[in-house]
Image (cartoon, rainbow, N blue to C red):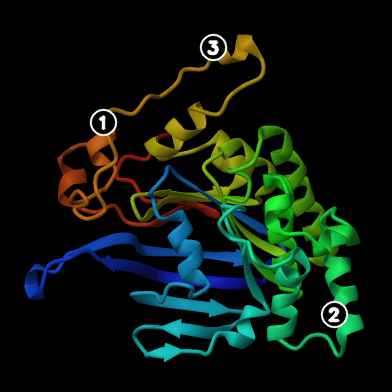
Amino acid sequence: MDKKLIQVEHLKQYFPAGGYGKNKRYVKAVDDVSFYVNKGETLGLVGESGCGKTTTGRTLLRLYEPTAGKIIYDDKVIFDSEKKIKVDMLPYRKKMQIVFQDPYASLDPRMTIGDIVGEAIDIHKLASGKQERYDMIIEMLRRVGLNSEHANRYPHEFSGGQRQRVGIARALAVNPEFIVCDEPISALDVSIQAQVINMFEDLQEELGLTYLFIAHDLSAVKHISNRIGVMYLGKLVELADSYELITHSLHPYTRSLISAIPVADPKIARANKRIVLEGDVPSPLNPPSGCRFRTRCPYATEECAAQEPEWKEVSTGHYVACHHCLQ
C-alpha cells in the first residue's frame, strides 16, 4: 500500500466570473492543493459545501481541465501546466472512474439500466459479442446487489439507493483501479448510507480498488478512510492518518468539524464541547489575505492576515497549514 497510485501537485482550478482584461475575475475553487493516494487505500476529503472537494475530484480526472498544477497517475504524468503536457485521457478513463453525488441527475432517464452500465463497455470495446456484453452487465449489477430483471428497467423505476448502486455498477464496468466517490451517500436515506458504505468496502477488498472518498459527513469518512484531508475555501488545511486526525487534530477548523460529529452516548455528548464557528464562509471570488480561515478563527493574529501559512509536515504523515497549530 506504500506505492503512490495518484499524485497531485499544486493543483489549481479557477473558473472565470466576469470582467475583462486586468479586471477579469476568477472563482478560485481549488487553489494550490497537493496530496497523493496510495494504491489500495481510501483517502477521505471533507469540508463544508463550496470548499472545492467535488471540483478537486473532477479536476483530478480532468473532467474539468486544470488551470495549473501537475497530475501523476501510476508514475506517468497525465497533466503538467509548466511543461505543457496534456495526455489523451481515453485510455485512462478505463483506469479512473467517478461515482457522482446525485443518483437522480447522473443517470440518463431515456436509457435502460442495462444500456447505462453497458455504455462504457461499448466505448472501450471490452465485449467481443452481444452475449459477452450482456453477461458483463449482469455480473456488474449482481456485484452491487441488483439482478438481471433490473437491466431492462429505466432509472425512474428505482429508489435513490438503487440508482446509486447503478452508478457504482457503471463505474465498475470498465474494471478501474481508482474511483472518485463524489459524496455518494449524501443524497441517500440514513438507513441506506451504511449499506452503500459497506458495499464500497467489500468491493475494495474484492477488486483491490483505490478511492478518493468525498463527503461532508466526518463520521462516514472516519469509518471508510485510511487517511483524511480537510479542505477549506479551496485549500487543504490538514491531512493525516484517519485515527490521528480524529484524536490529535492540529487545525482549529478540523477541531470544529470533529466537535460536530454526533455521539450516541448522551453522557459523552453532554460532556463534549461543541466548537461553533463565528461568521460565514468568505466568497472564493474574493478570499481573505493570508490564511483563508482567519476571518472565522478564534486564534487569528496579525500574522495570519499578513502571511499565508505554509503546508508542512509536523509529524510523520501529518500535514497542516496553520501559523498557530493547536496541541
| Mark carried by residue 271 | 3
Q: Which residue is mark 1?
A: 279
Kindly state the secondary structure of the residue where label 1 is placed: loop
Between 255 and 284, the residue placed more toward the observer is 284
**Cα separation between marks 3 and 2:** 57 Å
Residue contact at pointers 3 and 2, CB within 8 angstroms: no
Position of the N terminus by quadrant:
bottom right
Q: Where is residue 250 shown, x and y percent of the image?
A: 44, 39
In the depicted structure, whether residue 125 falls above or below residue 13: below
Extreme residue in the front direction: 110
The residue that disc 2 covers is: 133
| Of pointers 3 and 1, the one earlier in the residue sequence | 3
Q: Residue furthest left?
A: 22
Label 3 amino acid? Ala
Q: Looking at the image, is mark 3 or mark 1 nearer the viewer?
A: 1
Quarter of the picture containing the C terminus is top left
Q: What residue is rendered at 58% in x and 58% in y?
A: 100
* Point 41% across, 77% down: residue: 65
Q: Are marks 3 and 1 in contact (CB under 8 Å)?
A: no
Tell me the crowding category of disc 2: few under 14, some 14 to 19, or many 20 or more residues within 10 angstroms, Cα based: many
